[in-house]
Amino acid sequence: MTQDLFGESTEKPSSPINQAGVTGSVPLAERIRPTNLSEVVGQIHLLGPGKPLTLLFEQQHVHSLILWGPPGVGKTTLARLLAGAAKAQFIALSAVLSGVKEIRAAIEQASEYARTGKSTILFIDEIHRFNKSQQDALLPFVESGLVTFIGATTENPSFEVNSALLSRSQVYVLNSLNSDDFARLLKRAQAELNTEITVESDAFDALCAYADGDARRFLNLVEITLLQTKAQGLTVLVLPHAGRWCRPPLHGPTNCAHGLGRHRLGRPPRFYHCQ
């Protein structure tokens, strides 16, 4: 079981330590990662009263499932919280960095847990990165119930996940976050950063547009802009120009989707501005 999230102690460490052992350098998105269901933002279609994932939390039982959605919408967080609700051991793998060897090691660990009467949730991030043989290696253990499989993907599982594994998993679609979700995140970020800087509506709209539904991107940008604003002795975050702001184009300056002309770089914060 992941000690920092699901151990017996629920006390939040005052000085987070990242994987490199450096205190205080943990990104804001990780520092305020939800530790219970009430802190999760968005996904009301799955987490509202009587909704599918809410029922799983209430029943404290998890079946094999796949979380499909864009980056930064809470797939990993939900997997960890589900493991905590089910009181299961949580083993996480990244399909980008793992292969059959790592899968076998995870299965051996799950077998050890099973001998002590503990269940295991095997979480595989970016499951679409596994090839057919790697996905097939999971099947016997998902079928036997040795592990409960939770996969996360940004790609359509119907095309990227083997039909055999797909048939044993329920697919849940996660949506991009909206401005209401970002407003909740902003309040939590301000509390975590211990700042009362006022974010003007145009600046907030620009943050939301740049984040494009991604909570991680939004929080990274909030952390940078608020800390810079605080360092300058300012109490209000505003945009330097009036107008409409969009996230950067993929291949240099281009006509924006609003038909408002070409993008230019505004300072600070750094957004592309539609004239």
Image (cartoon, helix red, strand yellow):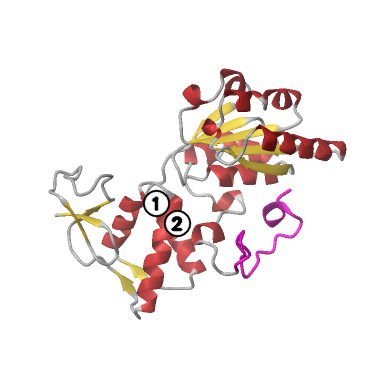
Residue at label 2? Answer: 184
Look at 69% across and 64% down and name the residue there.
Answer: 11
Give SS at disc 1.
helix
Q: Position of residue 94 (x, y in %)?
A: 59, 41
Look at 14% across and 54% down and name the residue there.
Answer: 275
Q: Are marks 2 and 1 in contact (CB under 8 Å)?
A: yes
The one nearer the camera, 205 or 4, is 4
Q: Give the answer, above or below, for where 132 lies relative to 126.
A: above
Question: Label 1 amino acid?
Answer: Asp
Verify whether residue 18 appears in magenta.
Answer: yes
Mark number for residue 180? 1
Label 1 crowding class (10 Å Cα cut-off): few <14, some 14-19, many 20+? few
Verify whether residue 169 appears in magenta.
Answer: no
Look at 65% across and 66% down and name the residue there.
Answer: 13
Q: Position of residue 30 (x, y in %)?
A: 54, 57
Q: Position of residue 50 (x, y in %)?
A: 57, 36
Disc 2 to disc 1, how far (Cα)? 7 Å
Image position of 31 (left or right of 180) = right
Question: Label 2 amino acid?
Answer: Arg
Image position of 135 (left or right of 228) = right
Can residue 59 be seen at all in this image of the molecule? no
Give SS at disc 2.
helix
The one nearer the camera, 47 or 68, is 68
Q: Which residues are magenta?
A: 1-22
Q: Give the answer, above or below, for where 222 lies relative to 144.
A: below
